[in-house]
Image: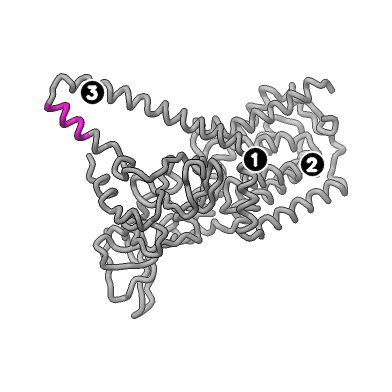
Amino acid sequence: MALGADRDRYASRGDTVVFVGCVLLSAAAMSLPGRLRDPLARALRQTVLAPFLSLQQQIERLSASLGRYDAVVAQRDSASLVATFLPELRGENSRLRSLLGLGTRLGTGYIPAEVLRDPEPTSPLSFIVSAGKKQGVKPLSTVVSPEGLVGIVSTVDQQTSVVVTWAHPEFRASAMAADGSVYGIVAPHGSEGPRVWLLELEGVAYRQLVANGTPILTSGLGGVVPRGIPVGVVVGVAAEAEGWERTYLLRPAVHPAAVTHVMILGGAPGGRGDLRSVFESGREAP
Amino acid sequence: MRRSDKYRFWVILAVLVVLQFSARRWLGGDRVAPDFLLLALLIYTIQARPGPSAGAGFIVGLVRDALTPASFGAGALAHTLVGYLSSWSKAVFFAENLFVNGCLFFAGTWCRNLAVAVASGKLKGGMLGWELLVWSPIQSLTTAVAGVLVLWLVGRRIAVRMSDA
């Protein structure tokens, strides 16, 4: 091997000083409060990392374009085939319309974005998306995928934003059963035991039973997350305080690690009304 | 030392950095694909003194922390530790051998993930177990394979003493 490390370079006092200094600086960075940490991280993203994030964004787009190419070719071939039969064409058009996805159902006021991931273990807790202030993203905007709630925007840069997913220990959202009979607070279940990557519906009154399989949606209370976005499905009781309240376990509608593209909802949350029909029609599509 | 060797060394590190943000998508996904940024750091530490290696690790970690704000500072600490220990242990214990360097890349990646997971305090119990026993070894293996390939292809061309670089 030609990589020649000289044998006489054990750590000198200067090396040790540099090492200890770096460790102390790291510890200081870990203990920074959010109001200092976020500007520092934003400055790094907008300077040192900006060209690399731009490159990553272009690669994501290229990859998505290549992926769509086969689908487009297949759709074009199918369209050419069915064009010879008008009734079948009408049926096909109807089916394709229903497949157009969440973007069409939402109408306007959303911002599509790619997820720019980093391979560190905590990446499912928060990640960067390829839309920022320039695209109209605002802090606390709700982030969704066609399946349901992904998280909320915590920090907005010029070209990118940081999304805190529902798996983040500090994430909370007001939620309700699909029929509106039960309300509670949704939070990540935690990282202990075999039920990791599940959600909890906390604060449900003890007298109110929620059956397994009940869909849980956001309630819109609190004015941050719009009403009617799927959060998950009840899979059991996690804990109960005797005579006071129950906590239910939810299977999440979306797993953050599996999300590659998201939509960031714009505008005032109250102005969007109930989004239940948007997501329900998505599930009914063939 | 020839000037062209010095430039070649930095060009290869730059290529690894670019690969981190471009090629990983096609190499098995986020949890499995090689970590080219960490690989660049480890290749740097093979030849650098422990002090500069710790400094480089701190800078790399801090930059990465900007991408994962959930664990801000943990990456800087983890990369500092890995950079320093890699350089120090390479000087003290390890022989110059392709396989040994591969083992260094594997251990460096796994230790980095362990340090990030522990320092961030966000992963516990089952999640920590899965991360350290399943995902991290896979990522460490792919990173080690990528590192061995890089050294095998260009190792002789980047025989630069960092003290001269």
A90 on left or right of A49:
left
The magenta region covers A87-95
Q: Are marks 1 and 3 on the same chain?
A: yes
Check disc 1 and give the amino acid type.
Thr
Q: Position of residue A126 (x, y in %)?
A: 51, 50
Residue B142 included in the magenta stretch of the image: no
Q: Which mark is residue A47?
A: 1
Query: Dot 1 lies on which element?
Result: loop
Label 1 and label 3: CA atoms lie apart by 47 Å
Chain under disc 2: B
Please state which of residues B24 and A182 is positioned toward the viewer in this rendering: A182
Identify the residue under disc 3.
Answer: A79
How are the residues colored?
Answer: one colour
Chain under disc 3: A
Query: Dot 2 lies on which element?
Result: helix
Q: Position of residue A210 (x, y in %)?
A: 28, 66
